[in-house]
Image (spheres, rainbow, N blue to C red):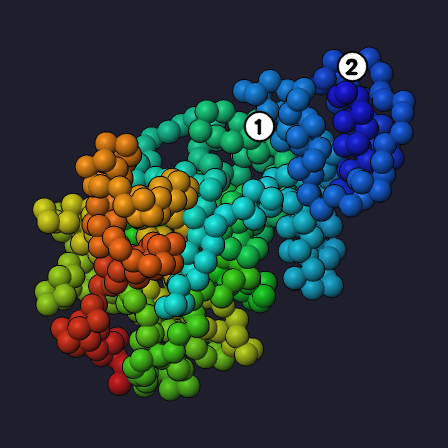
Amino acid sequence: MITKTIAKLIAYGKTHLSLGELDATYVRNILLKLFKQDEPYDGKIDQKEIDSLNVPDLLIEELKTDILPEEQESQIALVMSLISPRPDAVNDKFKELYKQSPKTATEYLYNINVKNFYVQKSKVDKNIEWNSADGLEISINLSKPEKSNADIKKALSSNNSKYPSCLICYENLGYWGKEKFPARQNIRFIPLMFNSEQWFMQYSPYGYFYRHFILVKKEHTPMVVSDDNLERLFDFVDLFPHFLIGSNSDLPITGGSILTHEHFQGGEHIFPMMKRDLKAIYKDPKFPSLEIGILDWYNSAIRVEGQNRDEVLNFVKNVIHTWKKYNDSASGIIAFSNNEQHNSVTPFVQKINGGYRAFIILRNNLTTIEYPDGVFHAHKEFFMIKKEGIGLIEAAGKFILPARLNRQLKTIEAILQDNISKEKYLELYPDLADFISFIEPLRGVKNIHESVIERVNEICKCILMNTAVFKDDEIGKKSFDLFMHQLGLE
């Protein structure tokens, strides 16, 4: 009965979303009209059950029975928005809590988005995750669509004047949704100012890692790795020192899935890359107090740490400026061709021990006849595991793999268990044609599941090694050292 569900939703709003008495009556009448009901439920509801709900999933399932399938996403988002505090009220409460501590304020924002079903925590919690022996974090994300590099590049060049301009635009606040644009009525985010520029912080509905947020520029402008945006990263960790923040490269193949709108990502997660030591240490004569070195990592990453913000910031700027125009024929690095830039970086910044630590991953998106999808991208033989651009999350060691792998890996285990021939499994499962080199070497292994997982782990490591601009061989080590000296380091 929809009227009882409405009564339970109102009670849930009071308990979990600060819905006041006057607003409760107001919202109840709106919901009755929305669902074409003449009067409210006059029975009792189980208040203890409502109080025990950490997420609204139970109520969402009840709602679905009274909404047409094609309207469920937008209608549910609308209902949950109605029982939530309005965006201005959330912002006011956030600012009040920030005076207590930045972490208290951000936890409040996160919990609002979980309780009102914008961050669908139960769905996120179903993602399949494990760690490799090499320290990589692997996740099969059951809700994330897989995009090709061609899709991403097409979106970057698209002149789409429709409203909103993209999936992360400011105008999505309260948006009803449409094809390829999910409903956003229930999103709640916080506006922030950086050097007179308007930005806003929202939590990711997918939550790829702990407290995963997105910091978005209000103005819809393309991604760019610049001095100004680098300063924004440092500004942000000054405001929220419990968070790590990073930026994707601003180029296709080496960037994230949305390059048309300036944004950063972060959270309270320490990525595998950040747990590694330095394998080569350098000194900067201009900033002798800085700790600088090449990270012992699969791709080409530099780490710098120091107490003085300006020194760390200026060092990172020097790396970026130098790298953007850097060529190295021995390592196949070309900074520009046909007026197209190929060198960029993936930077991260965090506060640590009262100072600043920054990571700079060197990236290059050059393509050739041999590697049309990118010389320093996952090579084609690994596309069955990951073909998208390797953004900041994967580059730092946490792989977000497509949902199809959940089915495909189980099928591969069954093939190995029953010793199904190559001809037969290709007939039964034609989408496994790209997995032949994955499956055949595993025939006869004793621990099938463990062996399949280990093969995925190995491929993820190989993908990171593919993205390294300076390979872990004699040529690569020498070339990396030459670049470090090009920075003026000793």
Q: Position of residue 247 (x, y in %)?
A: 41, 56
Please state, as top left, top right, bottom left or bottom right, where the C terminus lies in the image: bottom left
- Which amino acid, mark 1? Glu
Q: Position of residue 16 (x, y in %)?
A: 77, 44
Q: Which residue is mark 2?
A: 37
Q: Is residue 329 above or below residue 170?
A: below
Q: Which mark is residue 178?
A: none
Q: Position of residue 116 (x, y in %)?
A: 67, 39
- Which secondary structure, mark 2? loop
Q: Is residue 22 left or right of residue 132?
A: right
- Whether residue 251 appears in this view of the structure is no
- Whether residue 485 appears in this view of the structure is yes
Q: Which residue is mark 1?
A: 73
- Which amino acid, mark 2? Gln
**Viewer-side residue, 179 vs 52:** 52
Q: Quadrant of residue 376?
A: bottom left
Q: Is residue 270 above or below residue 423?
A: below
The crowding category of the residue bearing disc 1, from other C-alpha atoms within 10 Å (few below 14, some 14 to 19, many at least 20), is some
Please state, as top left, top right, bottom left or bottom right, where the N terminus lies in the image: top right
Q: Do the residues bearing badges 2 and 1 touch, measured as CB atoms within 8 Å?
A: no
The crowding category of the residue bearing disc 2, from other C-alpha atoms within 10 Å (few below 14, some 14 to 19, many at least 20), is few
Q: Is residue 302 left or right of residue 202?
A: left
- Which secondary structure, mark 1? helix
Write the residue at 82% across / 13% down.
38
**Viewer-side residue, 388 vs 54:** 54
